[in-house]
Amino acid sequence: MTDLEAALRGAVRGEVAFDVTSRALTTMDASNYRRVPLGVVAPRDAEDVAAVLAVCREHAVPVVARGGGTSIAGQATGTGVVLDFTRHMNRLVSLDPAARTAVVQPGLVLDRLQEAAAPHGLRFGPDPSTHSRCTLGGMIGNNSCGSHSVAWGTTADSVDELTVLTARGRSLRLGQGWAGAPEGLRELVDGELARLRTGFPDLPRRISGYALDALLPERGADVARSFCGSEGTLGVLTEAVVRLVEAPRARALAVLGYADEAGAAEAAAGLLPLGPLTVEGMAADLVPSTRGLPRGGAWLFVETGGESPAEARARAEAVVRAADVVDALVVTDPAGQRALWRVREDASGTATRMPGGTSRTESGGGSEAWPGWEDCAVPPARLGAYLRDFRGLLAAHGLRGTPYGHFGDGCIHVRIDFDLLTAAGVARFRRFSEELADVVVAHGGSLSGEHGDGQARAELLPRMYGEETVALFERAKAVWDPDDLLNPGMLVRPAPLDANLRFSVLPREPVDVAFGYPADGGDFSAAVRRCVGVAKCRTTSAAGSSVMCPSFRATGEEEHSTRGRAHLLHEMLAGELVTDGWRSTEVRDALDLCLSCKGCRSDCPVEVDMATYKAEFLHHHYAGRRRPAAHYAMGWLPVWLRWASRARLAPVVNALSAVRPLAAVAKRLGGIAGERDVPRLARETFSRWWRGRPAATGGGDLVVLWPDTFTEHLSPSAGRAAVRVLEAAGLRVALPPTLRGGVLADGRTRAATALLTARGGRVCCGLTYVSTGQLDRARTVLRRTLDLMAPVLETSAPVVVLEPSCAAALRTDLPELLHDDPRAARLAARVVTFAEALERHAPDWTPPVLDVPAVGQTHCHQHAVLGDAADRRLREAAGLTGELSGGCCGLAGNFGFEAGHYEVSVACAEDQLLPALRAAPEGSLLLADGYSCRTQLEQLAGARARHLAEVLAEGLEGLEGS
């Protein structure tokens, strides 16, 4: 233990962490930069903060305050001690509806404040797109804004008082009239009044530099306002009094279509006199699909408010009438508005991956795009002209970017496809940055319009303010922090904008991996680089149908978020902090609680696929080594179940598992959680039932029903029901061959099929091997499957997979593991869900109408990979009302059965699934297409859930019996 660590442990009641994992998790924020801290402290209160400052001052170690870690300019990284306020100092201290104020701690997430204020008809005005995970302390440090700033301004406009600790341990309460000003600040300002009155651009989004002009006497000498945007360089915030605004009772959204982004930008300023709540701009090259948007190549999202929906709509319609548009749409439905806003909020992530290539190379091109010039701002009336110059500069440097953002405030966001991997690319990044700074200044703008200067732009502040004003900033910093202890290298005396780049430590040659990573050019480093740190995975409540990230919501720990795991993988590839490569115990432990739910594959704006990364890591980590018992017990589950079936041991296994002492021993030996019940094996497998059923007739489309392991051995009732429904819909059902060269096992050729043979291979999606990282075995199984499926691939028959996790494995893992085998992509393209099969191949069939409410959960793999639109339409046609919950059931295949995972598994179920079950109307049907989901419900709630096929089959029987 170092002297610094020992001193901190002796002085601080909160957590002190100098371990590799804690440091690795805080090397980066959402910027291009990386700095390795000495340690991380989670203070419990202001006294702890003062103690940290005292110890660090004694050891001459810098201190960096960190909230959600979503800063885009590098200011939430540091080489000394990082203060993590999210763990303990995250409370809403009080809320006064009458005064419209709230007292907050710096680690409070913005959405928690909004939730507390909403019942009183109030809200905090600023709302960055990261509102579900950014903290009030970070917002004050960066003077954040958000889409509603045209109505409610920046964070500085919403601050009354701030309680801060200076680097030398003095507690100050900042406010107007020089309240809380450190000694020497007033004298400094009094000597520079002329400069402060003339040297600062007058525009709504001037965030760059220190807001020293807020200290002018005519502006109330507001020390609190001046402190906003100081990026943790002047003092450490411990508490804030913030103002709230009245929230409109109703809102409407006018979506205005323009021919191009310049047209939208030029129109934005003209809409401000109408008093909109937002004027947000976005171009077509940022939108994956224009479905639901009016015609045009760019759009303005103009939100209006009112006392009633009619008033809000009338104001939105007035906006449409006043705007010269190609097309327009007014949306008053709250769900429709949320869906449109999600497109805008995800832009900071989606903009990092553009069509047209893979990772950047020295020769140019590619799809990776990065911040760096994320949010400069100009006077709104000059935005159109500025964007034309900006686009011209991009073209001159051979770069691409997609501007979007706060057009009403003249502030744009953009991710640019800088090559930050090569010396030539980094040099171009510097030249472009210098030239763009001059363009911004020429238009009367600010280098930062929202996210702060940090390391990305502070070096260029002399171009905006001049050397003398920047020297004044340095003098102000010396008044507050004479020892330069707080976040050095930011704002004043900054590090070069091309130093400490996060990518410089990554390997230059592709890493040898098992998966193909087709979206990343086969490069695992590029896949890991997908995580840009916007931290959507750190949301503490899953909205609607979203899934990501259930383990973070269960534990609240950064290392159990998708971002945290991606950062650890980044550090593993870098080899500086995490030095054991694929053998790293730090990475292994962080991935241990990843449920492989695949939620990040769809919910993450940049489609980080942590389930695949986990499987890849486990494959390398255990190569040539003994694996955990659970990998053998559950990874090889298809083998054990086939053996039990061939020996007809199901009754014996069920009887033995019912004897608690025997079951306890078996679970301990198999690495299975003691709290879990061993599922019962079916007495008759699905295939055996199939062989014994009467031959079917019918001449409809041929569909091949996949006998997955769970349907075959554990839940054959779902398979029987699916056959019943598919045949009732006029389809001809077959099972895959089980011998190479075998024929399809349909209802009329069953006697000739290999299903009568106990020997020979059976098809398998390889899911259990993939999820446990046994990728060599998975490839062997999948190649055998492709051989067996050769007759199917010679037909046009779809492959119907009832188990969503197996369908997802065939759609994604199969072609990515066997990327060199063209049959893999062909089989993946054939895979359809039960509902998709009915919709595509029996479009005229009408399901039985049940007219009952349904409750349950959309399988996380279906949400992430397959989509559930067809399922929704089938449920609606069958009269099954209500929405299924999102999230993950928490069992997640082998995860919830593994020893040590039970508590997290239960916590995941309590996130959405179990509360939805408790709130369900009496008489509701319980739906869950995934075997894991059904098992979790049975074991935790004593409730029997059914596959949609089972429900429809029962409905058919009811019709026949009536």
Image (spheres, rainbow, N blue to C red):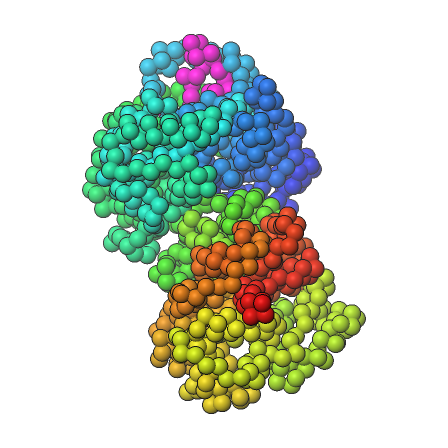
Q: Position of residue 369 (x, y in %)?
A: 34, 47
Report the front residue among 13 and 255: 255
Report the front residue among 326 and 28: 326
**Left or right: 151 as drawn, with respect to 561:** left
Q: How many marks overall? A: 0
Looking at this rendering, what residue extends furthest in the front direction?
Answer: 962
The image quadrant of residue 788 is bottom left
Going 39% across and 31% down the picture, which residue do you hit? 313
Q: Position of residue 460 (x, y in %)?
A: 33, 31
Going 51% across and 50% down the picture, which residue do you hit? 545
Q: Position of residue 951 (x, y in %)?
A: 57, 64
Q: Quadrant of the C terminus?
A: bottom right
The image quadrant of residue 589 is bottom right
Q: Position of residue 826 (x, y in %)?
A: 36, 72
Query: In this picture, is 747 found above or below 773?
Result: below
Report the front residue among 114 and 159: 114
Going 46% across and 32% down the picture, which residue do you hit? 127
Q: Which residues are magenta?
A: 206-227
**Left or right: 901 as drawn, with respect to 485:** right
Query: In this picture, is 85 found above or below 561?
Result: above
